[in-house]
Image (cartoon, rainbow, N blue to C red):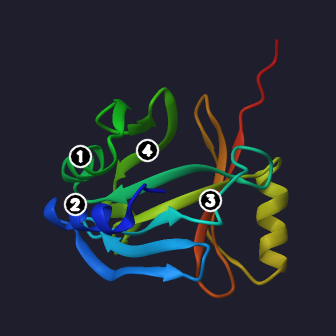
Amino acid sequence: AVENVDEATAKATSLGGTTILAPFDVMDFGRMSIIKDPTGAQLCLWQPKLHTGAGVTDDPHAFCWYELNTNDPETAVNFYTNLFGWTTGGSPEYIELKQGDVTFGGIMKIKAEWGNVPPHWLSYIHAPNVEETTNKALTLGANIVVPPMEIPNTGKFSVIADPQGAVFALYQPKTVTA
């Protein structure tokens, strides 16, 4: 979400991004554009009018994390921190993205063993049980890109392509016991 999509699109271009689709109105819901960052990952900018955007996050079955996979994390950090005012933390291997005090995503370098994967944003959906939800997606016609696996000290995830080819991830936070 941005305050002014026309200004944000122009700023993205001045920072090395590319405008894929110039700002346009989506009825009276909002105004949007589609841009590509300097590393090649695409995203939409949204200026809310009647529809503010996602109102539920981090709850089960809602979006909970956003990850940029890119060949050039340094260029991506420069672009997004200057465009949106985000700050970073974490490590060079996994750069965390923050807005204010809230960590909402990360940037990771694409690994050679992934094959020919282009730069992209990957959205994670909170799944109370990654294995069950992955198996259910499979029965509904999805393809499993990355089977359920552990993220040490963090939780579990999987990556799925829906029957139309849209790719997203599931995330199950590690259960903390007292």
- N-terminal of the two: label 2 or label 4? 2
Q: Mark 1–mark 2 contact, CB under 8 Å?
A: yes
Q: Position of residue 22 (x, y in %)?
A: 33, 81
**Residues under numbered marks 4 and 3 in contact, where contact means CB atoms less than 8 Å apart:** no
Question: Which of label 1 and label 2 is nearer to you?
Answer: 2
Q: Position of residue 145 (x, y in %)?
A: 58, 70
What's under tag 2, amino acid-wise?
Lys
**Residue 52 tag number:** 3
Is any part of residue 146 visible from this angle? no
- First-in-chain label (2 vs 3): 2
**Residue type highlighted by circle 1:** Asn
Q: Secondary structure at mark 4?
A: strand
Q: CA distance from mark 1 to mark 4?
A: 16 Å
* Mark 3–mark 1 distance (CA, rounded to whole Å): 23 Å
The residue under label 1 is: 82
Element under label 2?
helix
Q: Residues within 10 Å of mark 2 (few under 14, many from 20)?
A: some
